[in-house]
Image: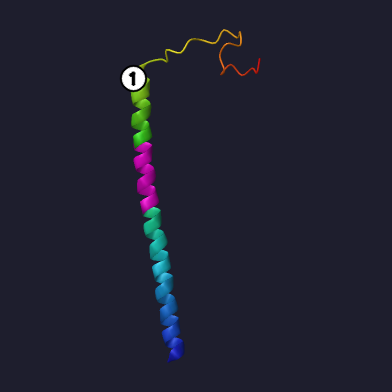
Amino acid sequence: MLVVVLVLVLVLFGFLFLLFFFVLGLVMRVEFQLKAQHFHTSDSVVEAAGPSRRLPDKGDGDYPWNGRLS
């Protein structure tokens, strides 16, 4: 009798374990889709804003983002 109860408890915990990961997977999938939708919207907004107004790098070392330590 004790063995049957232990087996049933283990099966129940196994089922709950699988159910937990199934729900977790669904939540992560929905979260990923929402983030992808947000970034897709953000990218289209950035593209609609036009090119950047930053001055082009002439290579003379005045700009910190030109890749040289000067």
**Image coords of residue 17 (percent x, y):** 42, 67
Residue plotted at (36% across, 46% down): 31
40 is higher (above) or lower (below) than 67:
below
- In the orientation shown, which residue stands out farthest toward the bottom? 1
Residue plotted at (48% across, 10% down): 55
Image quadrant in which you'd find residue 22: bottom left
45 is higher (above) or lower (below) than 63:
below
Is 66 within the magenta? no
Q: Main secondary structure of the magenta part?
A: helix
Residue plotted at (64% across, 17% down): 68
**Image coords of residue 24 (percent x, y):** 39, 56
Magenta part of the chain: 27-37
Image quadrant in which you'd find residue 39: top left
**Image coords of residue 18 (percent x, y):** 42, 65
Residue, disc 1: 48
Q: Quadrant of the C terminus?
A: top right
Q: Quadrant of the N terminus?
A: bottom left
47 is higher (above) or lower (below) than 30:
above
Residue plotted at (61% across, 11% down): 61
Amino acid at pointer 1: Ala
Of residues 56 and 41, which is closer to you in this image? 56
Query: Which class describes the residues within 10 Å of circle 1: few (<14), some (14-19), or many (20+)?
Result: few
